[in-house]
Amino acid sequence: MSQNMNMPWEERPEGCKEVMWRYSANPIIPRNLLPTSNSIFNSAVVRFNGVFAGVFRCDDTNRRMRLHVGFSKNGIDWNINPQPLKFCCDDPEIGEWVYGYDPRVCFIEGRYYVTWCNGYHGPTIGVAWTTDFETFHQLENAFIPFNRNGVLFPRKINGKFAMLSRPSDNGHTPFGDIFYSETPDMCYWGRHRHVMSPAPFEKSAWQCTKIGAGPTPIETPEGWLLIYHGVLNSCNGFVYSFGSALLDLDEPWKVKYRSGPYLISPQKIYECVGDVPNVTFPCAALHDEKTGRIAVYYGCADTVTGLVFGYIPEIVKFTKENSYI
Ligand code: BMA
């Protein structure tokens, strides 16, 4: 790994022509890092006080879906609290824990907001904030069930907080479009706009069944860079890959470009073998404005956590030059 502790980094391997490349020591988090963990994947990390902090999806050996807080000096070696995260909430009806998974963490105006798939009469989008990764203040759920993949934008847009989400069903949803919603106060969400649907099979098959936003979108001069997962329903079940899109900066429900080819698909053993085979599921990214470097954290086969690297300007170029829309 690079000496620069600003973010984890490893240069593109010689001869590699891919837009994004995997960390050579993947997976970075083994399934059994905690004494009671069955799997640690689909997790969110951010910079915090000169180190890194994160909210991790740790399914336990009862196969209950739990969230745990973790810290790291280099973004690669993680200390994850063996005790599950407990949210503080004034309203027991909202604060009652049922299950939680696939967290995202987004820094906006001095607070780290956590959004996750929260069990409340089925999956919906839970919202909480923290400033210290110790006390987490849980707010109202953003939407009614069923919904997944709630991903906040890192700044207000036209004066409102904004979120992407993916309305779904109570099972292993065989459909799914990404929508945009906004709120003045992190409580009342509205102005729901359609962003994008799965792609036509004949144009981009890896994303033809359903799609969902991944890490917090990154602001670039070309638009919001959105890395998102897409699903293909193969004869062997769902296959989760990820690609990229560029959304309009002021009206992010307008998609400017969308990659036909995937950036990453399940190809390595740790992505193809595990509790759910053939899943690469991005939930977080660290990036560096100066160098354009990006490191994406992704769940592998619903079992372990991996890292892939790239350069934002190259991903933007790839998205534009290979857009199918
Ligand atoms: C989705 C979510 C993800 C998971 C994926 C593949 O519906 O449950 O957490 O990674 O399925 O199993």
Image (cartoon, rainbow, N blue to C red):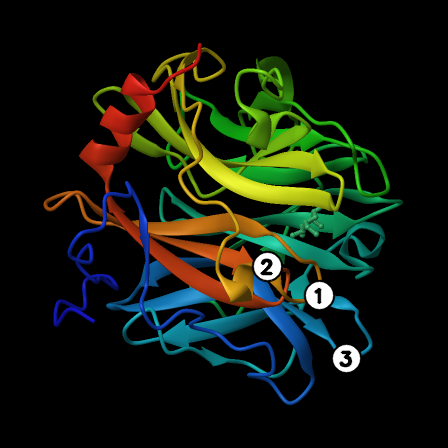
Compared to 188, does 57 lie above or below? Answer: below
Residue 162 is situated, as x and y percent measured from the top left of the image, at 50, 27
319 left or right, relative to 290: right
Q: Amino acid at mark 2?
A: Cys
Label located before the other in sequence (1 or 3): 3
User: Between 285 and 186, which is closer to the camera in this rendering?
Assistant: 285
Residue at image x 79%, y 69%? 64
Left-right relation of 256 to 80? left
Specify the label residue 275 is tagged with. Answer: 1
Q: Residue at x 53, y 66 (%)?
A: 270
Q: Secondary structure at mark 3?
A: loop
Residue 62 point in image, percent of width and height: 82, 77
Nearer-the-camera pick, 238 or 177: 238
Q: Residue furthest right?
A: 121
- State the residue at coordinates (28%, 43%): 18
Mark 3, Cα crowd under 10 Å, few <14 / some 14-19 / many 20+, is few
Name the residue carrying label 2.
272
For the N terminus, the image quarter is: bottom left
